[in-house]
Image (cartoon, grey):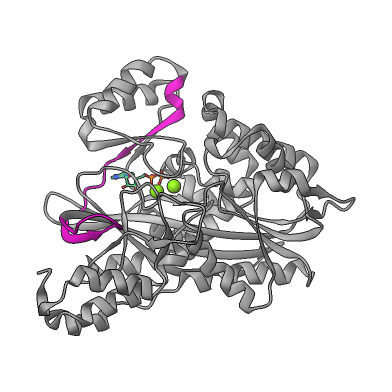
Amino acid sequence: MQKELGLDLAEVARDAALLHGLLMRTRDAPNSSEVVGHAPFALFPSPVPKSLFLQALAAQPLFNRLVDRISRDPEFLENVLASTIKVDDFTARLFSIYRHVLQEGPKQSIVLGLNRSDYMVDQDRDGGMSLKQIEINTIAASFGGLTSQMPDVHRYVMAFVITLFQNAKKILDNNPAAGLAKGLAKAWELYGSERAVVMFLVEEIQRNIYDHRYIENELWKRNIPVIRRRFEEVFKTGSLDQEKRLFVGGKEVAIVYFRNGYMPQNYTEQSWEVRLMMERSLAIKCPDIGTHLAGTKKVQQELARPGVLESFFPNEPDAVDQIRATFAGQYTLDMGEEGDRTVAMALAEPDVFVLKPQREGGGNNIYGSEICQVLEAVKGGSERTAYILMDKIRPRPSHNYLLRPGEPLRLNACLSELGAFGAYVRHGKDMVMNECVGHLLRTKSVEYSDGGVAAGVAVLDNPLLV
Ligand code: ADP
Ligand code: MG
Ligand code: MG
């Protein structure tokens, strides 16, 4: 297969990836663009049932509205996260910023949300397939930039293989970079100051910088100035003026776009101060602290409870049904009888569940026998409330070749995870933009139960609708 048409197809594919800008900095020099490689990707697109793909895209504007409503419901967030913040320091610190801003009164009535709702296709015993949500990422949802290059990469590869030539046409267009930038541009316009900048709040190590650059580039094309700053730089050169306008290095900031700040390791004491300052400011935060909290796994679990979705969409039974159809079973570990039942259920059959802490970025979940070890250790105490339990989704594996720089081509049994990118802008009471702006397909070898592209587990892919 590698030598099909007398060509080394993997080499053709790697060239296609570089040619189309599917770029990533190298592991060895993650902060330098002098030598770059390609992002990991699948040699061929992976099958996704068409109806379920369309279902995910159609649900996205509803998830946008749901997240937005949760972010504005302090009572709900307070109740739902009460047990979590007693034992989870990270969520507690975020929550204390939320309370602080609430008490002071939010300064900015423009809200910008850029999120990604992730799904897997669950297969039941009879072979029936359904779309199940894994999670929704409301902060620093990534790969919208790079994945915008994936259609061309696969079209190029497939054009080289006679038997796949016809299928090249079936690769869908996809440009989340443009859609995410459209949201940023809309919010920037509403902020209403020509000189004000969009600030990408970036990580210490920026291996995935090209993913950002595609979005940045769309903004430059519209003459919207962009700066990239780390927490430390904002700490040193940032301040609020009397009207709480945020200035960084002398530049007024219209939007803080967080591409960092989603996990405890991202923060020093200084960064926490900076986060608070930015949240208190007039700058539009993407996301604001309430929206960040709306994306926690604990909130996701509570939404699955009967009646909760109805409270957010009181007169929209169809919206409730559409959202709920994507929910997998989720169970509380709060103290009390219900939580005790969850513990007993998980211990009895650990292989059908995933135990999730309030973390992002991949590699934090607990599976199989380890669920028993962890629950045995925490089951009687409040530490267990740092987690939620979720039904394990079981997608049907398909075969693909995964390409990583410096690694030989391997044929793998793979599982795919589909993401739908959401972008919305609210101005006071008016939703002035609410869209699904594209999709992401990430594929990983079945041997891994967890982890994304950045964690070195999954690779970028395209759906081939079947
Ligand atoms: P994170 O915020 O760290 O990305 P996720 O909830 O997305 O957390 O979990 C990380 C990975 O674990 C997912 O990409 C998926 O591969 C796997 N995973 C999470 N939840 C489930 C589930 N319910 N069933 C099967 N796999 C899951
Ligand atoms: Mg996440
Ligand atoms: Mg995830």
Q: Nearer the viewer, residue 377 or 7?
A: 7
Q: Does the magenta stretch include residue 455?
A: no
Question: For the point 33% across and 22% down, which residue is it?
Answer: 374
Instruction: Classify 263 as above or below 242.
Output: above
* Visible residue check, residue 396: no
Seen in the picture, residue 62 relative to 174 is either above or below; the reply is above
- Quadrant where the N terminus lies? bottom left
Where is residue 246 shown, x and y percent of the image?
A: 79, 53
Give the quarter of the figure containing the C terminus: bottom left
- The image shows residue 60 at horizontal and vertical percentages of 45, 63
At a point 23% along the width and 59% down the height, the residue shown is 402
Q: Residue furthest right?
A: 242
Residue at screen point 77% across, 48% down: 237
Q: What stretch is highlighted in magenta?
A: 383-411
Residue 385 falls inside the magenta stretch: yes
The image quarter containing residue 164 is bottom left
Q: Where is residue 104 in the image (x, y as percent from the top left)?
A: 80, 41
Q: In which quarter of the image is residue 363?
A: top left
Residue 266 vs residue 346, the one in the foreground: 266
Q: Quadrant of ligand 1?
A: top left
Residue pictured at 56% horizontal, 46% vertical: 204
